[in-house]
């Protein structure tokens, strides 16, 4: 008879997500995951099958949380142009906050580190990008109808611009760009909207 689990799987998944977020997929060892979660190797493998499975579940949890935060802003009563600026500002504030740990965004980090050689992770990232793109595009289309966003550029192109700018802000911050430079990038990007 199998023993019942003696741990909170959600808490373990959150701890693993933090471990992967801090050091990346490749650099996070099974022992690191044991230390982070407080679980033994057998518990990790019995629950999550493999390091890769645990990573995919942690990445999915991260994307779900970050997309919920974005959706909350996109569904707010702010005018569309202010939503765009708020998305840029949140990114800058996250990256430049006092005590910011420099770990960036798990999605951006995974795109850079893992997606080129892992088809299942690449597919998850592509689905996530598609979901974010659709949500942002709908907000931009609404803003164009309201006269708040320029109609001279296709809404899909502007949605890609917004997502690419956020990714670029995150990577640039990790490369050492300071708040003033990041603000300048966001201001320049806003001129397209």
Image: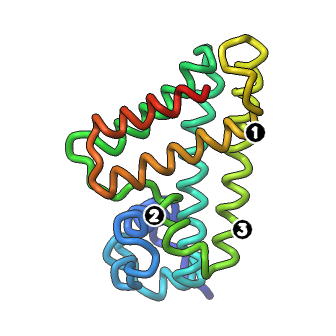
Disc nearest the viewer among 1 and 2: 1
Q: Is residue 148 above or below residue 140?
A: above
Residue with the mark numbered 3: 123
Which of the two residues, 112 or 149, is positioned nearer the viewer here? 149
Kindly state the secondary structure of the residue where label 2 is placed.
helix
Instruction: Give whichever of discs 1 and 2 has the lower sequence position.
Output: 2
Q: Give the quarter of the image for residue 137.
A: top right
Which of the two residues, 140 or 76, is positioned nearer the viewer here? 140
Mark 3 Cα within 10 Å, few/some/many (few <14, many 20+)? few
Give me the residue at 59% from left, 29% from top: 192
Q: Give the quarter of the image for residue 30.
A: bottom left
User: What percent of the width, then of the height, locates residue 26?
Assistant: 44, 81
Mark 1 Cα within 10 Å, few/some/many (few <14, many 20+)? some
Give me the residue at 41% from left, 55% from top: 171
Question: Contact (CB < 8 A) between labels 1 and 2?
Answer: no
User: Seen in the image, is 100 located left or right of residue 29?
Assistant: left
Disc nearest the viewer among 3 and 1: 1
Kindly state the secondary structure of the residue where label 3 is placed.
helix
Question: Contact (CB < 8 A) between labels 3 and 2?
Answer: no
Which of the two residues, 27 or 89, is positioned nearer the viewer here? 89
Residue with the mark numbered 2: 17
User: Seen in the image, is 29 located left or right of residue 71?
Assistant: left
Q: Residue furthest top?
A: 146
User: What percent of the width, then of the height, locates residue 60?
Assistant: 60, 60
């Amino acid at each position: 008879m199998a023993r019942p689990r003696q741990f909170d799987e959600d808490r373990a998944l959150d701890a693993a997500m933090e471990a992967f977020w801090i050091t990346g997929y490749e650099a996070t060892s099974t022992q690191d995951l044991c230390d982070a979660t407080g679980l033994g190797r057998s518990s990790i493998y019995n629950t999550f099958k493999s390091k890769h499975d645990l990573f995919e579940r942690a990445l999915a949890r991260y994307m779900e949380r970050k997309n919920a935060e974005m959706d909350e802003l996109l569904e707010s009563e702010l005018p569309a142009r202010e939503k765009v600026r708020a998305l840029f500002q949140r990114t800058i504030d996250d990256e430049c906050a006092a005590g910011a740990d420099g770990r960036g965004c798990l999605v951006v980090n995974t795109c850079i580190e893992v997606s080129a050689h892992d088809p299942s992770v690449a597919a998850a990232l592509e689905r996530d990008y598609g979901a974010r793109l659709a949500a942002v595009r709908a907000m931009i289309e609404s803003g164009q109808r309201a006269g708040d966003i320029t109609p001279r550029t296709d809404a899909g192109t502007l949605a890609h611009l917004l997502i690419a700018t956020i990714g670029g802000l995150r990577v640039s911050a990790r490369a050492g760009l300071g708040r003033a430079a990041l603000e300048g990038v966001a201001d320049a990007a806003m001129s397209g909207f």
